[in-house]
Image (cartoon, helix red, strand yellow):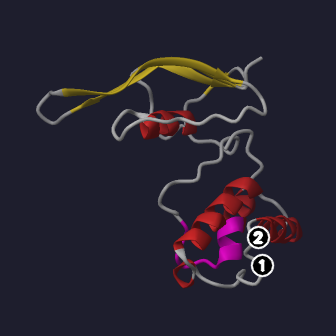
Amino acid sequence: MNQLSIQGVSRVFEGTKGQRTQALQPIDFEVRENDFVTILGPSGCGKSTLLRIVAGLDFPTTGQVLLDGQHIDGPGADRGVVFQSYTLFPWLTIAQNIRFGLRERGMSEAEQKERSDFFIAKVGLRGFENHFPKQLSGGMQQRTAIARALANDPKML
């Protein structure tokens, strides 16, 4: 079975004056477990729209997206998203940002610490656990966002 199945997915946005903008032409493709996929194209071709649909943050106008045979109808912990803008909570430290989703899932504090420490080391941020996002460079903030996504052990990133 394909891990991700995109079947006839398109997206049309309706303007305030009734005009329609085709943001994503109908697309079909499959992604198997352990595949590494890159989506390339010029600005405005629908890359971000497609990824938002796969993440469950937007809905297709036509078609459907399946993950392990299940219809995606909203955000879920089974899909990790790292946005172009870091989307870190500015009032939380790096460690707290990484632990946020783990805490929301009811993970014990000891396991939260173990997982966040592991991923902080993986992305090369050991020693910065107690820093706030504004104290880090853009690249360090992006690595924090990657660590946060990976700490939740998603099926797909």
Residue found 67% across the figure and 44% down from its top: 157
**Label 2: which secondary element:** helix
User: What residue did someone put label 1 on?
Assistant: 126
Q: Position of residue 67 (x, y in %)?
A: 67, 27
Residue 29 versus residue 76 in the image, above or below: above
User: What residue did someone put label 2 on?
Assistant: 120
Q: Position of residue 57 (x, y in %)?
A: 49, 41
Position of the N terminus by quadrant: top right
Q: Looking at the picture, tell me which residue is in the foreground, 113 or 123.
A: 123
Say which amino acid is labelled 2. Answer: Ile
Picture quadrant where residue 141 is located? bottom right
Residue 139 versus residue 43 in the image, above or below: below
**Label 1: which secondary element:** loop
Q: CA distance from mark 1 to mark 2?
A: 6 Å
Decide which of tag 1 and tag 2 comes sooner along the chain.
2
**Does the segment drawn in magenta span residue 29?**
no
Q: Mark 1 and mark 2 in contact? Answer it, CB < 8 Å.
A: yes
Residue lying at the far left of the rendered structure: 17
**Range of residues picked out in magenta:** 88-98
**Does the segment drawn in magenta span residue 97?**
yes
Q: Residues within 10 Å of mark 2 (few under 14, many from 20)?
A: many
Q: Looking at the picture, tell me which residue is in the foreground, 131 or 91.
A: 131
Residue found 56% across the figure and 77% down from its top: 133
Q: Is there any visible trace of residue 88 in the rendered image?
A: yes
Picture quadrant where residue 14 is located? top left
Q: Position of residue 118 (x, y in %)?
A: 84, 67
Say which amino acid is labelled 1. Answer: Arg
Residue 22 versus residue 154 in the image, above or below: above
Q: Is residue 42 left or right of residue 146?
A: left
Residue found 88% across the figure and 71% down from its top: 110
Q: Residues within 10 Å of mark 1 (few under 14, many from 20)?
A: few
Q: Is residue 19 left or right of residue 24?
A: left
